[in-house]
């Protein structure tokens, strides 16, 4: 499957959520904490612009492969292959046995909505708040969300984290919430 998406930084997730509700959008997945672990073999996947990710969230666990990204008018497109897994810990053991290793972990609190044929994710991350729109023509949906003037981010969350770490090495390797924010994520979104 080809994923086509835009991601924009926002100051007020509540305002976007209100627009979704007013427009009659359907809540697909309630707020939950995602924990994502990237796997690689000596930078081989990253060197080719690819990602192998194991995600745990309120819905269970998934493994995802993403191919190299292509940008066209601020829209990121890439191959995405994903499937649910029953035992994420066992899957990670298998990946390690195959010579891969966990290279980075990142967290976000996410809720997803269906809006006019698009999937809209409201993400609270250690780097701030973002809205991701995945659709055939994702830029067309920004206006209806009150985000027509927002500048899409070209970097992934991992790329944004690596950029932030370069400016502030004290941030640490993983993009995770501080222990004080490890309570119920539904309190914040």
Image (tube, grey):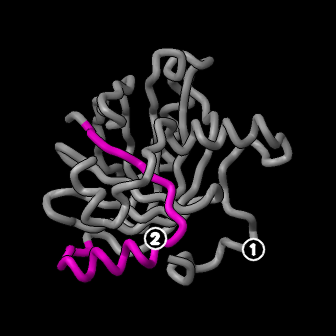
Residue under the image location 35 percent in, 81 percent down: 18
Q: Nearer the viewer, residue 100 or 162?
A: 162
Q: Earlier in the sequence, mark 2 or mark 1?
A: 2
Which quarter of the picture shows residue 61?
A: bottom left
Residue 104 horizontal side relative to residue 157, left or right: right
Furthest-right residue in view? 170
Image label count: 2
Q: Nearer the viewer, residue 87 or 141?
A: 141
Q: 98 above or below 124?
A: above
Q: 17 above or below 141?
A: below
- Report the disc number at residue 13: none
Residue 141 horizontal side relative to residue 171, left or right: left
Residue under the image location 47 percent in, 36 percent down: 154
Q: Report x, y in % for residue 24.
A: 18, 79
Q: Secondary structure at mark 1?
A: helix
Q: 165 above or below 108?
A: above
Q: Report x, y in % for residue 37.
A: 55, 44
Disc 1 residue crowd, few under 14, some 14–19, many 20+, Cα 10 Å = few
Disc 2 residue crowd, few under 14, some 14–19, many 20+, Cα 10 Å = many
Q: Report x, y in % for residue 124.
A: 53, 64
Magenta-drawn segment? 3-27
Work out which quarter of the rendered image holds the N terminus and state it. top left
- Report the disc number at residue 180: 1
Which quarter of the picture shows residue 107?
A: bottom right
Q: 7 above or below 167?
A: below
Residue 172 horizontal side relative to residue 68, left or right: right
Q: Report x, y in % for residue 53.
A: 46, 39
Instruction: Work out how far the residue at label 2 is from the one at label 1, CA to CA, in angstroms.
Output: 17 Å
Furthest-front residue in view? 149
Residue under the image location 64 percent in, 43 percent down: 161
Which residue is tagged 2? 32
Q: Nearer the viewer, residue 51 or 171?
A: 171
């Amino acid at each position: 499957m080809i994923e086509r998406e835009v991601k924009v930084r926002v100051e007020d997730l509540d305002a976007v959520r209100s627009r979704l509700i007013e427009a009659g959008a359907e809540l697909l997945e309630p707020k939950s904490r995602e924990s994502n672990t990237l796997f690689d073999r000596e930078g081989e996947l990253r060197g080719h612009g690819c990602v192998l990710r194991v995600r745990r969230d309120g819905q269970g666990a998934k493994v995802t492969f993403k191919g190299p990204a292509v940008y066209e008018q601020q829209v990121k497109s890439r191959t995405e292959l994903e499937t649910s897994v029953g035992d994420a810990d066992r899957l990670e053991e298998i990946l390690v046995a195959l010579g891969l290793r966990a290279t980075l972990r990142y967290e976000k609190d996410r809720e997803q909505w269906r809006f006019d044929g698009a999937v809209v994710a409201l993400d609270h991350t250690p780097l701030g708040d973002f809205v991701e729109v995945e659709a055939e023509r994702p830029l067309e949906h920004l206006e209806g969300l009150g985000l027509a003037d927002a500048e899409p981010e070209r970097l992934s969350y991992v790329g944004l984290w690596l950029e932030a770490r370069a400016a502030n090495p004290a941030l640490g390797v993983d993009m995770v919430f501080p222990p004080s924010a490890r309570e119920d994520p539904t309190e914040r979104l």
